[in-house]
Amino acid sequence: MKKFILLSVSIFFVLSMQAQKFGFKIGLNLSGVNSSTVLADYQTAALAKGLNGGLVFEFNPVKRIGIRAEALFSQKGYTVESDVNVNGTDAVINTSLTMNYIEIPLLLKLKLGPAYITAGPYFAYAVSGKDIASITVDGQKLAEDQYANYGQVPSNDVFKDGEFNGDNITFSHTDMGLNLGLGVKLLMFFAEARYGVGLTNIENYNGIPADEFTKNYNISLSVGMLFGK
């Protein structure tokens, strides 16, 4: 994986130096995970919301085909709900995970007039990750000093603390996947929607079989500007 990340960084710098167009983008991520672990048994509360944005470089070897390289800050994660019973009291635990990635997509761009299609791999490294829990009993959110009774903590850094909300889980800093997107460009402005699916297992449950997996998926909506020829 480290070799793939180094290769993607190298390709990014080569393309950025050859770029005929450059610019920036900013937008919204809506993300979740595909999982075969115990996460699959939980109710998904909603797609996790996050930010994406960064630099865009584009090289056009022929008229209708371009090559795009991006360097992005991208927030991904998930939110889940679980029902528990402690000493006869029913409670709902809502837990959200946010991973902050530096992401490098390398994309082939096919132009169809003002519209275009993009497709290609991405490589990402998580610089930080945090989970936050909230517990509700009879419609009332509990005070944080009561979370320990339910085996939870209000929040923690998943890389620094080495686990996810008290569970025996470790996380991978690296992620790799594929993107497919649609966009439209008018003058120097563009808007696009993109779907990304992760190919890398981002969680490891100690004591869970090695073939179990948790992989990112993400819908990104963004707008931006491109300058140049």
Image (cartoon, grey):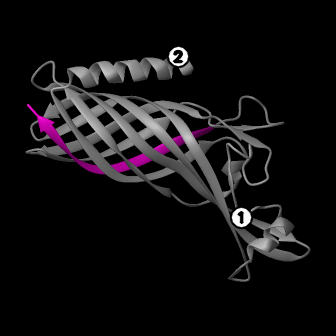
Q: Which residue is mark 2?
A: 3
- Residue drawn at (51%, 48%) of the image: 76
- Residue drawn at (89%, 76%) of the image: 88
- Residue drawn at (32%, 31%) of the image: 119
> In this rendering, would 118 be left or right of 143?
left
Q: Residue 136 — which label?
A: none
Q: Position of residue 10 (x, y in %)?
A: 39, 18
Above or below 95: residue 158: above
> In this rendering, would 98 be left or right of 29?
right
Q: Which residues fall within the magenta stretch?
A: 214-229
Q: Position of residue 164 (x, y in %)?
A: 72, 49
Q: Nearer the viewer, residue 80 or 24?
A: 24
Magenta stretch contains residue 224? yes
Q: Nearer the viewer, residue 79 or 42?
A: 79
Q: Which residue is mark 1?
A: 154
Amino acid type of the residue tagged 2 in the rendering: Lys
